[in-house]
């Protein structure tokens, strides 16, 4: 799994080594949503460029991807894109409304809507692959670059609800009320996401992350019966591309073992579960990623240090731990605290002199 990083300096490989369960000089660290509104450079760019314009302009997306690497000294970059970009070539329409977030103009609510969901236009997302190619050049192989896709359930929930939701009522109504239409929709989503993810790897992504951000809305039995097979199908196809796959979900502590069964080389866990017991539940042979509470980055530095040390102590110094948050950085986070968190991880996990600030 390290072939995508064979041009990297050994210190730069620590993220991919951890994804493979191999020892590294210290615990690698990166952050979900590490490029975003908490950074002044990004806020400046957003004053003149809407988010979709940044996503669809490779020059801008690559620059935003690079910003946290320059500012934070993290061990991996993640391409700047949006989880919902695939809904456009699927024919549903997408816009971002100020103060409300993403809105899908043609939501999928019944079987006849599912039949209109396109699976043959994925090439229209080629701007993301171009962003990856350009970001790789801008990063100059300083760190691996992570690509990503949404998980089938999370993408389906947006497509059905028309945006974010508190209770996912429309999603569950379709899932329970018309299992055939649900399976058809999930199959179409898998087809698009698998092709989209493969294009990211072909463009130079060294790893892929699958985000199941809303999977915690499900009962365990519903996850096992109606979602797991589709997540499993997607992850199998992504893994066939030859790079590590991180499978991340939130609110899934009640069915963590089932979530793990869906596959992935690395299990990403949120902050609502203790890392030590969670790792034991799925077996220490599986690398894990996580799981600091994102709000801990707003705490005084002495408390931040204690919170980080608690996560690292739970990991027990085992190979195969990627330090991250249990979800993304929130906009009001002080950038100096994020930078400090990177150095705290390094201080506490340095096994060799090579683990020093770069």
Image (tube, helix red, strand yellow):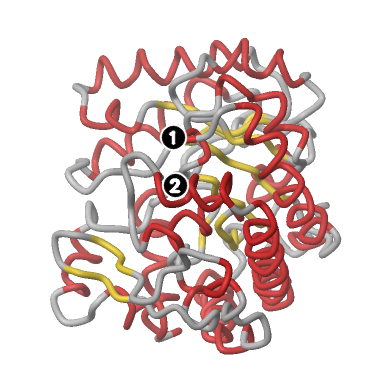
Q: Is residue 71 left or right of residue 208?
A: left
Q: Position of residue 311 (x, y in %)?
A: 49, 18
- Spot the residue most to the front: 177
Q: Residue at x 39, y 76 (%)?
A: 106
Residue annotated with mark 2: 32
Q: In this figure, what is the number of numbered marks?
A: 2
5 versus 200 height, above or below: above
356 versus 282 height, above or below: below
Q: Is residue 190 left or right of residue 335?
A: right
User: What is the crowding at mark 1: few (fewer than 14 residues within 10 Å), some, or many (at least 20)?
Assistant: many
Which of the pair 152/349 is nearer the observer? 152
The quadrant holding residue 26 is top right
Q: Position of residue 203 (x, y in %)?
A: 67, 78
Q: Residue at x 15, y 67 (%)?
A: 98
Q: Position of residue 85 (x, y in %)?
A: 47, 73
Q: CA distance from mark 1 to mark 2?
A: 7 Å
Q: Position of residue 291 (x, y in %)?
A: 49, 28
First in sequence: mark 1 vs mark 2:
2
Q: Residue at x 62, y 17 (%)?
A: 278
266 versus 185 height, above or below: above
Q: Residue at x 79, y 40 (%)?
A: 20
Q: Which mark is residue 56?
A: none
Residue annotated with mark 1: 325
The quadrant holding residue 118 is bottom right
Q: Mark 2 and mark 1 in contact (Cβ < 8 Å)?
A: yes
Label 1's element? strand
Label 2's element? loop
């Amino acid at each position: 799994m390290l072939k995508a990083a064979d041009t990297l300096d050994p210190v730069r490989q620590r993220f991919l080594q951890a994804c493979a369960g191999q020892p590294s000089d210290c615990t690698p660290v990166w952050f979900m949503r590490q490029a975003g509104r908490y950074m002044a450079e990004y806020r400046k760019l957003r004053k003149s460029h809407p988010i979709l314009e940044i996503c669809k302009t490779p020059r801008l997306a690559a620059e935003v991807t690079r910003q946290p690497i320059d500012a934070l000294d993290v061990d991996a970059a993640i391409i700047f894109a949006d989880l919902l970009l695939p809904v456009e070539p699927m024919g549903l329409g997408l816009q971002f409304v100020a103060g409300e977030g993403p809105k899908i103009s043609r939501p999928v609510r019944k079987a006849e809507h599912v039949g209109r969901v396109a699976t043959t236009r994925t090439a229209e997302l080629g701007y993301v692959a171009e962003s990856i190619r350009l970001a790789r050049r801008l990063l100059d192989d300083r760190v691996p670059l992570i690509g990503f896709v949404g998980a089938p359930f999370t993408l389906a929930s947006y497509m059905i609800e028309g945006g974010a939701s508190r209770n996912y009522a429309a999603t569950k109504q379709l899932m329970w009320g018309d299992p055939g239409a649900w399976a058809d929709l999930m199959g179409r989503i898998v087809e698009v996401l698998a092709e989209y993810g493969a294009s990211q790897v072909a463009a130079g992504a060294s790893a892929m992350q699958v985000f199941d951000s809303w999977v915690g809305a499900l009962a365990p039995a519903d996850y096992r019966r109606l979602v797991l097979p589709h997540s499993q199908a997607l992850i199998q196809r992504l893994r066939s591309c030859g790079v590590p796959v991180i499978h991340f979900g939130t609110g899934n502590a009640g069915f963590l073992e089932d979530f793990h069964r869906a596959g992935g080389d690395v299990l990403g866990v949120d902050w609502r579960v203790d890392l030590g017991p969670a790792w034991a539940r799925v077996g220490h042979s599986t690398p894990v990623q996580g799981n600091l509470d994102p709000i801990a980055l707003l705490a005084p530095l002495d408390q931040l240090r204690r919170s980080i040390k608690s996560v690292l102590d739970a990991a027990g110094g085992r190979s195969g731990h990627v330090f991250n948050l249990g979800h993304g950085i929130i906009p009001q986070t002080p950038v100096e605290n994020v930078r400090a968190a990177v150095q705290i991880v390094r201080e506490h996990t340095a096994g060799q002199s090579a683990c020093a600030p770069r």
